[in-house]
Image: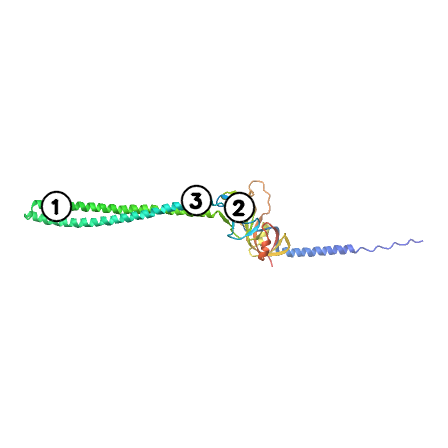
Amino acid sequence: MAQEQEPKKKPNRVLPIVLGIILLGGIAFGIKEYIYYGKHIDTDDAQIDGDISPVVARVGGYVDSIFFEENGHVNKGQVLVKLDDRDYKVKLEQALSAKQSASAGIGVGQSQISNTAANASSARAQVESAQAKLEQANKDYARYANLVKDGSVTQQQFDQVKANRDVAEATYRAAQDQYKAALEQIGVSRNQLSVTNVGVTQKQADVDYAKLQLSYTTITAPASGIASKKNIQIGQLVQPGQTLFSVVNDNSVFVTANFKETQLANLKDGQKVEIDVDAFPKWKLHGVVYNFSGATGAKFSLLPPDNATGNFVKVVQRVPVKIKINTAADTLARLRPGMSVSVSVIYKD
């Protein structure tokens, strides 16, 4: 008997179809990515940044009161910490007393100037009187000098007139010296008053400084925001220059994106940016490129690299770029500096 032929197997058409679909999907994905990256520059090396104001003690002292809570909201100018101010009040009282004592010297100096001015006026009057008597004595002397020649007056009378003239001259010179001394005394008194005024000015400066130091015992919020990183407790002794806490300013958050140096050619100010926040994956924030850092991040590091040491490996550097966020204030309030984000700059429409 003839052997029966086995039926031929039908070719498997599923695999080519699947491979075709995958190929088409890959091509579509590649085209999509090509079109996307032809218009966008992306980086995930980015984070939320913000203005953080450290609050530093300007004077030393013991913490008397604390008027805020950790991570609580504070308003600009709000009193947050009060230091024990008794020492500074005593110093202010001492400065005020010293100023009052110095001010009393001004009254004494002015009285001395008034007295010396009165003495100078009296001396001037004496000069004028002595001058008038001297002029009269000179006239009498000239008249008697002519009369003694023709014998109209005796020699004794002429000698008396001459003596009177000499006395008048001496009196006039003495009056001039007294007037000159009185004027010099006025100058001395005025100089002393000037010195006293300088002393009062110095004492006023001491008072102002004491008031300033006293005002530093009341520590206020430098800006409105969240007060965090509190490092003080009631009764703690703080030193000048010690950081007490920090305030993260309201509505000051922005994005710092570290782009590769090879990505900077197409970046410029004002370009639109799409922002994805890791903490809020459903959000789609928008912003604009604001400015570029003056140097790469490596140059601002604690130990910047030195490529002249001999061992050199080229590493692509990154440049920090500041991006302003355009969104509502309530959304900004939920963002915190340090949060990770991904940004995409649209550099071509």
Image check: 81 left or right of 24?
A: left
Mark pair 1, 2: CA separation:
93 Å
Q: Residue furthest top?
A: 310
Q: Amino acid at mark 3?
A: Lys
- Residue density around tag 2, few if under 14, some if 14–19, many if 20 or more, within 10 Å: some
Reading the image, the residue beneath label 3 is 91
The quadrant holding residue 275 is bottom right
Identify the mark at residue 220; answer none if there is no mark: none
Q: Position of residue 18 (x, y in %)?
A: 75, 55
Q: Position of residue 304 (x, y in %)?
A: 55, 43
Mark pair 2, 3: CA separation:
25 Å
Of the image marks 1 and 2, the number of the one nearer the N terminus: 1
Q: Is residue 86 visible?
A: yes
Q: Nearer the viewer, residue 88 or 15?
A: 88
Q: Amino acid at mark 2?
A: Leu
Q: Nearer the viewer, residue 144 or 346?
A: 144
- Residue density around tag 3, few if under 14, some if 14–19, many if 20 or more, within 10 Å: some
Query: Given contact means CB atoms under 8 Å apart, are the residues at marks 2 and 3 in contact?
Result: no
Reading the image, the residue beneath label 1 is 162
Of the image marks 1 and 3, the number of the one nearer the N terminus: 3
Image check: 331 left or right of 209?
A: right
**Could you say whether the residue bearing mark 3 is in a helix, strand or loop?**
helix
**Residue at left 34%, top 47%?**
106
- Residue density around tag 1, few if under 14, some if 14–19, many if 20 or more, within 10 Å: some
Q: Position of residue 80 (x, y in %)?
A: 52, 49
**Could you say whether the residue bearing mark 2 is in a helix, strand or loop?**
strand
Identify the mark at residue 244; answer none if there is no mark: 2
Image check: 156 left or right of 175?
A: left
**Could you say whether the residue bearing mark 1 is in a helix, strand or loop?**
helix
Of the image marks 2 and 3, the number of the one nearer the N terminus: 3
Residue 103, placed above or below residue 21: above
